Image (cartoon, helix red, strand yellow):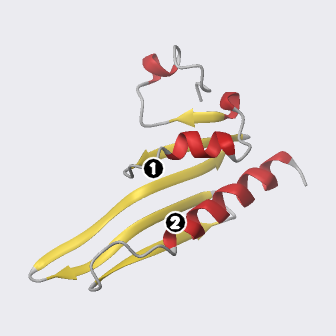
Amino acid sequence: MDQIAKYKKIIRELVEHYGSIKKVPEEVQTLVAIDEDHGQYLLYNSGWKDDRRNYGCFLHIGVKDGKVHLYHDGTNLEIGAELLELGIPKEDLVLEFQAPSKRAISGYALA
C-alpha cells in the first residue's frame, strides 16, 4: 500500500469511528462526509433541538500533496496527536488551523 492510500485509510477509519459515536441530542445527527477522490473527510452535525438549528462541521481532515492537513478540530480529542499515534509522521501532518508563521516553530509540516 502506498503512503497516500495508507493515510487515507487511517483517516477514513478514524472519521468513521468517531462518526459512529452518538453524543448529540437525538434530534441531531452526526454525519460523515468522505470524498476519497479528493481526499476530504468531514464530521458534522445537522438537525434541530427545540427551535434551534444545530449545524456545523467539527472535524475536517484532507490529504493533499502527500501530506495530511488537519483543517479543523472542533473536538476535545486532540485529533492531531491521535493521527500521530495511528502512524502519520509529524513531518507529514499540517496543522492548517494554525497560522503559517506558528507552523514554522511547531515541528509539524509547513504545508
Residue sitting at the far top: 105
Q: In which quarter of the image is the C terminus?
A: top right
Left or right, 104 with respect to 65, comes to left
Please report the residue visible at 34 percent of the width from the left and 71 percent of the height from the top.
45
Left or right, 107 with respect to 96, comes to right
Q: Nearer the viewer, residue 107 or 2?
A: 107
Q: Which image quadrant is residue 99 in?
A: top left
Residue marked by disc 2:
18
Q: In the image, residue 2 lies at what x, y percent? A: 88, 50
Please tell me whether mark 1 sits on a helix, a strand or a loop.
loop
87 to 17, vertically: above or below? above
Looking at numbered disc 1 in the image, what kind of residue is underneath it? Leu
Q: Nearer the viewer, residue 101 or 76?
A: 76
Point out the tag, 1 or 2, that comes first from the N-terminus.
2
Residue marked by disc 1:
77
Question: Which numbered disc covers residue 23?
Answer: none
Is there a contact, CB below 8 Å, between mark 1 and mark 2? yes
Question: Dot 1, crowdedness within 10 Å: few (<14), some or many (≥20)?
Answer: few
Left or right, 57 with respect to 90, comes to left
